[in-house]
Amino acid sequence: MHVAGHLTALGWTMLALYLVVALLAFRVAAISGSANSAAMGRVWICLGIILAVLGLNKQVDLQTLLIHFGRHIARREGLLAYRPELHFALFLGFTLTVIALLAIAMLRFSAEVGEFVRKFPIAVSGCGLICVYIVIRAALIDHVNRTLGVDPEGIPFIWPLEAGGLLLIMFQALRTSAPR
């Protein structure tokens, strides 16, 4: 089994979990929109879209397509001798890009994000776990894990991080959308 669980029972289960949680996020967005909290509705819509894309990527595996494309270019340009360094640079670039996007979102939508953090701390914790999972998975690119001294088979907590994050978001969404 591949570490990420792609095309396995675990991978299909995670896809289903992502899609269920995304639908719940859209449900909370609809409820938030009708409860005069349009800003929170927009945050839940963004979260639902991100979760749906991440879920679909569990089976489409876009990062593997990007890796193959990058290898093709590296072969063509004669850069295979620098493969470990390129992998590390790509991992570092990916991590910095994620951090920059989060910082931009925090600056651009600080009021909405701040309110979301205050109102939905359980969902925020779930988002944090999923972000940690994504960074770990990015680090598991062939040479990056060796450079960092990480054995992907020795990380028993990687899929529970992802599932735990999704379950926290699901709990918050169900709690938020429950009739009062």
Image: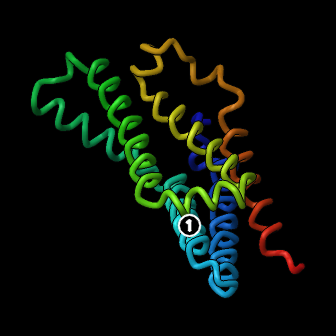
Q: Nearer the viewer, residue 110 or 29?
A: 110
Residue 27 quadrant: bottom right
**Secondary element type, mark 1:** helix
| 28 to 33, vertically: above or below | above
Q: In the image, residue 93 lies at what x, y percent?
A: 32, 34
Q: In the image, residue 46 lies at what x, y percent?
A: 52, 66
Residue furthest bottom in the image:
34
Query: Could you tell me if residue 56 is visible in this image?
Result: no
Residue 51 quadrant: bottom right
Query: Could you tell me if residue 171 is visible in this image?
Result: yes
| 45 to 36, vertically: above or below | above
Residue carrying label 1: 43
Judged left or right of residue 83, residue 106 is right
- Callout count: 1
Judged left or right of residue 158, residue 85 is left
The amino acid type, in three-letter code, at marker 1 is Val
Judged left or right of residue 66, residue 117 is right
Q: In the image, residue 21 lies at what x, y percent?
A: 68, 64
Residue at the image position 40 percent from the left and 45 percent from the top? 63
Residue at the image position 56 percent from the left and 42 percent from the top? 131
Residue at the image position 51 percent from the left and 12 percent from the top? 149
Residue at the image position 42 percent from the left and 24 percent from the top? 142
Residue furthest left in the image:
77
- Quadrant where the C terminus is found in the figure: bottom right
Judged left or right of residue 12, residue 112 is left
Residue 25 quadrant: bottom right
